[in-house]
Image (spheres, grey):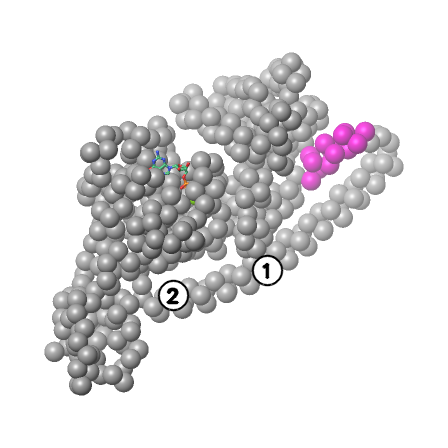
């Protein structure tokens, strides 16, 4: 899909404005970003105000010829529609407009396809695109047929239909195979997660709209507390830079470790198939003790982005997990000396400049470890597993190795205190 700038395919963007709101303008801007992320060049935009989309054509009948003329004038190579086209709309439009037609979902799938790195992410994207393709085979075939200059004879048509049926069966077979592979990976992931659960280190997940700065924040934590460049992840000014889940153990101070997970970003109208396909990756979110919702505070649409994030979280059954709101990129809107700013459940930081990372870690610790109990325990040497568990999960203020056992001055989570209170002095 990669092309050099002078050979980039030219895309004409088409949108239907249903509520005359500002939202539409933002959504068209986002469509242009998605188009660019697919390495196409947006060369023009046609919009139409309608009370409802046209069932058969998406845009109004009269608008179709305007699109045709404009595409010719602008020498467009392809057309990009702002919303998911139904299979019927795609087929009808394809018959009227003799250019390749893409929609928002298709672009997102293409970007995911290009960015997927791990085996699991690749399978997930493959599954989502086959599911998208299956009901649209007819529309896609028409376009292929036209490009190939197929004859309109009856026999040719019969052969086409046969091929279509074979394609359909083949794709269904592929879909089933992919689902099985993914289930298998998901079982493995559960085993790993269970192992992690027994270590009782609280889990914190970074969530939020794509490009908000989640990966940059993970890297800022690595800079601050791990100082190991190899533990860093990709951060980049593009939509969907991250598709794979990464987990890092962060230890701001003794005993206060937590596991920090970076996840795939959300977007408005994220194709449903993709959410389903990425469900196992995003399960990390469901099992988190705390969510860090990263918001691009410098983006004028950040409020809409927050709504999208909260509805996506609900869809992932993660709507009840406590959230700490992180207004990131605050360096673009506020004076540096005013940062970081911490309020009730909000914190204003700059992940890129490393401003507010320690304050954020304190907030995380407060939220995760506030139900801690201070005590002193004597752990016999034969209970080595308990002492190592405590060293890993509790705040250990001092350890003293005496003949009768290890004396530990601790700040320990309430449930662990109940569990080990027999060892308390
Ligand atoms: N000015 C400024 N830029 C930032 C800040 N944090 C992140 N960025 C930039 O925002 C862009 C996106 O950052 P990422 O960390 O890749 O965003 P993400 O949320 O992981 O995005 P996806 O993985 O695509 O969902 C990068 O170009 C970062 O350099 C910040 O605090 N200030
Ligand atoms: Mg990222």
- Quadrant of picture, ligand 2: top left
Q: Which residue position is annotated with label 1?
A: 181
Marking on residue 380? none
> Is the CB of mark 1 within 8 Å of ligand 1?
no
- In the displayed structure image, the side of residue 251 where residue 378 appears, left or right: left
Viewport quadrant of the N terminus: top right
- Gap in angstroms between the C-alphas marked 1 and 2: 23 Å
Q: Which residue position is annotated with label 2?
A: 196
| Residue 105, percent from left and from top | 55, 37
Relative vertical location of residue 343 with respect to residue 51 in this rendering, above or below: below
Dot in front, 1 or 2? 2
What range is drawn magenta here?
137-149
| Residue 276, percent from left and from top | 51, 49
Q: Quadrant of residue 248?
A: bottom left
- The structure residue drawn at horizontal position 47% and vertical position 62%, both measured from the top left corner, is 189
Q: Nearer the viewer, residue 232 or 289?
A: 232
Relative vertical location of residue 331 with respect to residue 202 in this rendering, above or below: above
């Amino acid at each position: 899909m990669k092309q050099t700038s002078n050979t980039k395919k030219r895309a004409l963007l088409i949108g239907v404005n249903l509520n005359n709101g500002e939202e539409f303008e933002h959504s068209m801007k986002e469509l242009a970003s998605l188009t660019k992320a697919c390495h196409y060049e947006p060369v023009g935009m046609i919009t139409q105000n309608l009370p409802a989309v046209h069932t058969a054509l998406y845009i109004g009948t009269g608008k179709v010829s305007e699109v045709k003329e404009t595409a010719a004038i602008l020498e467009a190579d392809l057309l990009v529609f702002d919303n998911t086209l139904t299979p019927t709309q795609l087929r009808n439009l394809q018959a009227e407009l003799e250019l390749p037609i893409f929609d928002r979902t298709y672009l997102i799938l293409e970007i995911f396809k290009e960015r997927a790195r791990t085996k699991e992410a690749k399978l997930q994207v493959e599954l989502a695109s086959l599911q998208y393709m299956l009901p649209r085979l007819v529309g896609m075939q028409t376009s292929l047929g036209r490009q190939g200059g197929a004859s309109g004879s009856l026999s040719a048509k019969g052969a086409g239909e046969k091929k279509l049926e074979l394609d359909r069966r083949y794709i269904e077979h592929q879909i089933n195979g992919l689902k099985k592979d993914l289930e298998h990976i998901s079982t493995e992931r559960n085993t790993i997660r269970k192992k992690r659960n027994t270590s009782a280190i609280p889990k914190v997940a970074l969530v939020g709209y794509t490009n908000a700065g989640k990966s940059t924040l993970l890297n800022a934590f690595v800079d601050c507390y791990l100082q190991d460049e190899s533990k860093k992840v990709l951060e980049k000014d593009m939509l969907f830079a991250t598709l794979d889940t990464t987990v890092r153990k962060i230890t701001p101070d003794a005993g206060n470790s937590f596991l920090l997970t970076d996840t795939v970003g959300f977007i408005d109208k994220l194709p449903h198939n993709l959410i389903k396909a990425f469900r196992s990756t995003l399960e990390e979110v469901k099992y988190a003790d705390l969510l860090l919702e990263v918001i691009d505070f410098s983006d004028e649409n950040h409020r809409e982005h927050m709504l999208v994030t909260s509805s996506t979280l609900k869809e992932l059954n993660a709507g009840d997990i406590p959230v700490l709101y992180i207004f990131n990129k605050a360096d673009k809107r506020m004076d540096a000396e005013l940062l970081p700013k911490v309020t009730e459940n909000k914190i204003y930081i700059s992940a890129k400049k490393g401003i507010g990372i320690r304050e954020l870690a304190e907030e995380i610790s407060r939220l995760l470890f506030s139900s801690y109990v201070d005590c002193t325990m004597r752990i016999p040497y034969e209970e080595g597993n308990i002492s190592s568990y405590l060293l890993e999960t509790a705040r250990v203020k001092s350890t003293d190795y005496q003949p009768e056992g290890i004396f530990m001055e601790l700040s320990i989570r309430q449930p662990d205190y109940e569990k080990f209170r027999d060892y308390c002095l």
